[in-house]
Amino acid sequence: MADMSVDVVVIGGGATGTGVARDVAMRGFSVVLVDRADLAQGTTGRYHGLLHSGGRYVISDPESARECAEENAIITRIHANAVEQTGGLFVVTPEDSEEYSDGFMAGAEKADMPAEEISVAQALAREPRLNKGIKRAFAVCDGTVDGWAMVWGAAESAKEHGATILTYHQVDKIHRVGDQITGVECVDRKAGGRLSIDCRFVINAGGPWAGHIAEMAGCHDVEVVPGRGIMIAMNHRLVNTVVNRCIKPADGDIIVPVHTVAIVGTTDVKADDPDRLPIPRNEVQQMLDSGEALVPGFRQARAVHAWAGARPLVKDNRVSAGDTRHMSRGMAVLDHQERDGVNGLLTISGGKLTTYRLMAKRIVDIMCEQLGEDRRCTTDQEVVPTARHQHTYRVTHRLEDRDHGFQKDQIICECELMSREMFVDLAEENPHATLDDLRRRLRLGMGPCQGGFCSSRAAGLLCSSGIQDSAEATEELREFLKHRWIGLWPIVAGAQVRQTALDEWIARGTLDIDHAPGTQNPPERYPVGAGANGTENAEVAR
């Protein structure tokens, strides 16, 4: 007998999976979302933060451009606390031909995407650090979005409508009776044990891992190609507007201001395993050089973290198997009823973070049709709980936040203005959360010191607040610093050497973290271990 019984199981807790759970719950179905790790710990959290205007696709993929333009407006409204309306610029640098830009405005008009050509002087007035030699500039409605805040907002909305969210539950079996999906089995990776869930329908939103999930149901022809991309965060906002090169999409053609940093990205290389994504030094240098074309002096700024993500690209027979740069970015819903004769299973892949809500709508529409249910999508109408009483996000919002009494409350992370109360409140609400889980919600250790100062304070609070004992808190600190190191080793150069050396002295010299007494057998909380050479991707997200 199953431990739970629901209408729908959603596998995958990234933006798309969480959006699906929200949509399903809002249509009145009972739903459980399961993920092998934390929410938004996969592709969604390994992202450069761009809320697409559609400008990148106005020439190569007008339909994707149209979808991005429409969803940009919806996401900005329903996730106001997670979106910064920075605006965007597409510029022709001295290194670029003007041929591509000649078709930009016509493409924008065809895709119904708001855009305006502005003078070079206007662009330079808006972003003084821009290359003074730019030839043309186009203003668009790009923005930036905190993927974790957005996903947790969608999750809270889903829970309000009755959904159950189970993180650290890894599906290892999908049950079928004949051609009908009947349920799933999961391993609880924190508490141990197994959980069996009966259901009428399974939606596979596993991103780069979707093929493996489909195989559990006997569907062996789901070809999702992981496209590895690296990104680098610089230690301050070199620009306050999203800046794109007005060229055919290429490596390192965008700088995105997110929170207190600027992110340059990204490469696009076929990966063999989405759990093991290298961060090659030559690609790091390539990103820094590309940033220089947009903002002279970029190479001299301090890089503070590098990470890699895997785009879940549906195999495109129009291009070679290894050419992930030119594979379609469009979403794809795979109907296993048509493909494999299996009822009660759909897989979704492709798409972009900006279009997560639309992706969810499309797959849930198909599910409803197959179930014979006529239930309308309303996810574009209801603001998520975390945005109901907050204005549009501003990078200075924590300076103005009086709920945590910054005049009196101790600041634990100076870089991100995370207070003691913010940390303890969330840790007490989620007593089984790791320091990395809390980091994703609070941005602990994501500023210039990369946790050098605040991580030990946070571990101390876990202990002093009675949430963990000293051995558990020490183990948490060890794991946290190990995962931070993965994103530091490829960029240790220049000024960053001094910061990294200081962090090393604090952790190993003062705290002797390698030999501090911890738990003898810490639980396996992450998909894979963190390799010292940075080639394994336990938690590469920034």
Image: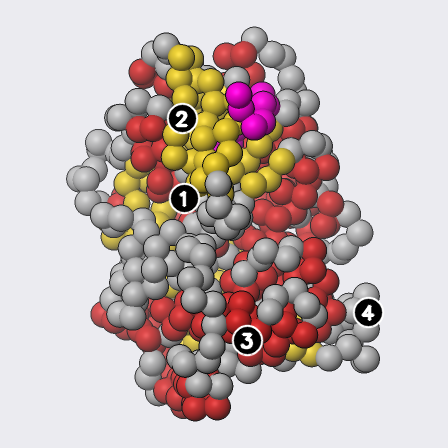
Q: Which residue is mark 3?
A: 455
| Amino acid type at image mark 2 | Ile
Q: Residue 282 at x, y = what percent?
A: 23, 70
Residue at 42% across / 55% down in the picture?
524
The image shows residue 68, relative to residue 439, as above or below, that is above
Per the image, label 3 sits on a secondary structure element best described as helix
Decide which of tag 4 and tag 2 comes sooner along the chain. 2
Q: Which residue is mark 4?
A: 402
Q: Which residue is mark 1?
A: 57
| Amino acid type at image mark 3 | Ser
Contact (Cβ within 8 Å) of mark 4 with mark 1:
no
**Cα separation between marks 4 and 1:** 41 Å
Residue 49 can be seen, yes or no: yes
Left or right, residue 376 beside residue 166: right
Left or right, residue 77 beside residue 128: right
The span shown in magenta is 1-12
Q: Which residue is mark 2?
A: 174
